[in-house]
Image: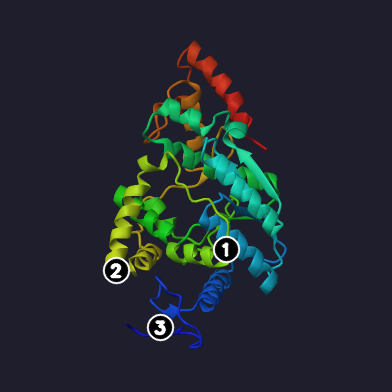
Amino acid sequence: MSAPVQCGSCGASRAALRRPKTGQALCRACFVAAFEAEVHGTIVAARLFRAGETVAVGASGGKDSTVLAHLLRLLNERHGYGLRLLLLSVDEGIAGYRDDSLAAVRRNRARLGLPLHVVSYQQLYGWSMDRIARHVGPKNNCTFCGVFRRQALDRGAALLGADKIATGHNADDVAETVLMNFLRGDVGRLRRCTGILTGGEGALPRCKPLKHAYEKEIVLYAYFQGLDYFSTECVYAPNAYRGYARTLLKDLEAVRPSAVASLVHSGERLAVREDVRMPTQGTCQHCGYLSSQPLCKACVLLEGLNRGLPRLGIGKPSRLQKALTDAEKPGAGVQEDSQQSSKVVRTIDF
């Protein structure tokens, strides 16, 4: 029988785990201390926050956002960041999933003592995700949800007067996104997807304090700290393209644990030729949200839903965009629908 492995840091306690990120054997206390120190180091090195800022923490009830909220509150008090923290959740309207996860968010609100604000798809767009799924079918649900959720977070944070949004994206998430954008040939997103701090040019800045934290270590930290989080997968997630990238990444990580960090590093060092045309940032002519097209993706998707043609906004910019931006009159019936949908779109402005 092999002898117990001692902690490679303190040398006094028995090791409780071998870190997936470094392979170092650590006891529980040393792992927790190292994890917290690394996240603090990431925040300081990237200058993610400034004293006096109001930071909206995207809270989904899952492990990443729960650990993020716990750490930001802890580190804010420990190191004197001088931040005003609040929790911001998006209710997509997914029965049996989001209602349960929001219950976990509310429990954490009570534990952390942070204010919580919830915005919903129904409130902003007049559609719930369950209703969208019934119209769209089993595919492309995540396209709608991703676009709407990103905008909902921005609008919710603006309503609260936040200076910045902090999200729980971890190293695995970033590596998956690098893979997805590479496989899709999306140079524009591939170039910016690894940024730890994004926005700032008219958009509310977003940051990823957990960018260099492995998913496995986030789970371990949550377990050792006894954090309460919701772990059920979204009912629409099995049809998502990201799932295939995640499976590929897990297979690579099983063979080479450094694959996650290597993919993130590759994305950060990506060089694009100067003659490659990159999308330019503008504003949506309908809602004023940032967009590289005359109409933002959310408005196009919403227009398709309101016209009874939910697949109209899927894929590349459609004829619908041209008709709307050029003020064409496709027909009396369509024009009437457009007026009605414009009313819906305007309700999402705060």
Alpha carbon separation for disc pair 3 and 1:
24 Å
Q: Under tag 3, what secondary structure?
A: loop
Say which residue appears at 42% left-offset and 31% top-offset: 313
Say which residue appears at 67% left-offset and 73% top-offset: 78
Q: Dot 2 surroundings within 10 Å: few (below 14), some, or many (20 or more)?
A: few
Residue 102 in the image: state x and y as whole percent.
59, 45
- Which residue bears the numbered disc 1? 226
Alpha carbon separation for disc pair 3 and 2:
23 Å
Q: Under tag 2, what secondary structure?
A: loop
- Which residue bears the numbered disc 3? 5
The quadrant in which residue 205 appears is bottom right
Q: Is residue 179 left or right of residue 158?
A: left
Q: Nearer the viewer, residue 318 or 57?
A: 57
Foreground: disc 3 or disc 2: 3
Image quarter in which the C terminus is found: top right
Label located before the other in sequence (1 or 2): 1
The residue type indicated by label 1 comes to: Gly
Image quarter in which the N terminus is found: bottom left
Q: Is residue 171 above or below residue 14?
A: above
Say which residue appears at 55% left-offset and 34% top-offset: 285
